[in-house]
Amino acid sequence: MKKIWIITLFPDFFKPLLETGVAGAALRGERGQEFEMNMISLRNFSPKDFKGVDAAPFGGGAGMVMRPDVLKNSLIEGIVKPGNYGENYKEKLHIVFPNPRGKVWNNDSCKSFAQSAWSEDSKKDIVFICGRYEGIDQRFIDLYIDEEFSLGDYVLTGGEIATMAIIDSSLRFSEGVLGNRNSHEDESFQNNLLEHPQYTKPREFEGVNVPDVLLSGDHKKIAKYQHVEKIRVTKKFRPDLLIDGDHGER
Ligand SMILES: C[S@@+](CC[C@H](N)C(=O)[O-])C[C@H]1O[C@@H](n2cnc3c(N)ncnc32)[C@H](O)[C@@H]1O
């Protein structure tokens, strides 16, 4: 059983993720592997003499910063104790903080996170810390965070969407989550290529026909056509991906 703990000011953000689609089914344990996702509401862990989770930054500046003592409280009282992780809890938990300065999350991150975090062999449960305001006190990052990931070069209002993106996109690479085991093999960013255009019924739509080759039944021809299309689409939309040679262009 793999436990996922999420420390957040907004636990409700995660309800749709749990209740919907492929990721929801996986998280409910319906795709082979057993998961248990637990929301830890940060507001429940503010000190008794201080009702809040944030304070003004030392040195001045706009906005508020999440307090390290409140975050630690939520980790120890909300996760370590109820999860029975004991004194060596740091060896049993992998703590992730989505943060704009982190390593940029991409398809390779999804695969390696799936291997290291979601695999049955990995003994560690996963904790996500969702930042808000101006972020979290540096001392909590230095003392407790194992890995920081950025979704990209822009700033979200909080870490909840980043956490969901990390869970959703990496779960796809977890054994048994996608119905067709090869589904991700053919998708964008595999081998540095974008996906070829897709077509379905009807064969003719507003005067535009599906390319003949896709209706030919000739699997070799179709595969070749789709490969050439992948290269064309990648050159058009993301030429920066095509730095490693010709990708078998035939
Ligand atoms: C408003 S942001 C704080 C931004 C921070 N003051 C800065 O300039 O880097 C609040 C929280 O949203 C999350 N966040 C914002 N942008 C993100 C991104 N690009 N990738 C991952 N998490 C992000 C982080 O958890 C962050 O602590």
Image: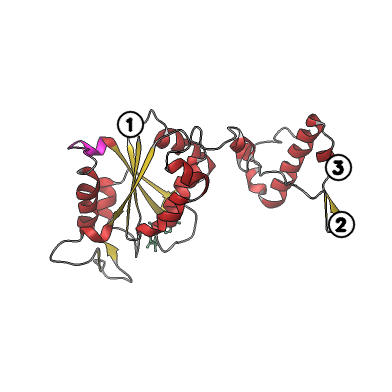
Q: Where's the C terminus, which quadrant?
A: top right
Task: Provide residue 175's location: percent of width, then percent of height.
Answer: 49, 32
Residue 206, relative to residue 197: is it above or below?
Answer: below
| Callout 3 amino acid | Asp
Residue furthest to the left in view is: 49
Labels 1 and 2: the sequence-earlier one:
1
The secondary structure that most of the magenta stretch takes on is loop
Residue furthest to the top in view is: 121
Residue 125, relative to residue 120: is it above or below?
Answer: below
Residue 189 sits in which quadrant? top right
Residue receiving disc 2:
207
Q: Where's the N terminus, which quadrant?
A: top left
Labels 3 and 1: the sequence-earlier one:
1
Q: Residues within 10 Å of mark 2 (few under 14, many from 20)?
A: few
Residue receiving disc 3:
212
Instruction: Report if the beta carbon of the residue with label 3 is closer than 8 angstroms to ligand 1.
Output: no
Q: Which residues are magenta?
A: 84-91
Q: For the residues marked 1 and 2, what is the alpha-carbon distance in whole angstroms?
A: 56 Å
Q: Is residue 2 left or right of residue 247?
A: left
- Mark 1 secondary-structure assignment: loop
Residue receiving disc 1:
123
- Mark 2 secondary-structure assignment: loop
Count of marks placed on residues: 3
Question: Which residue lies at the image location 45% right of the left edge and 47% below the top edge?
Answer: 166
Residue 190 sits in which quadrant? top right
Q: Residues within 10 Å of mark 3 (few under 14, many from 20)?
A: few
Residue 79's tag is none
Labels 3 and 2: the sequence-earlier one:
2
Residue 218, relative to residue 160: is it above or below?
Answer: above
Q: Is residue 150 visible?
A: no
Where ligand 1 lies, by quadrant? bottom left
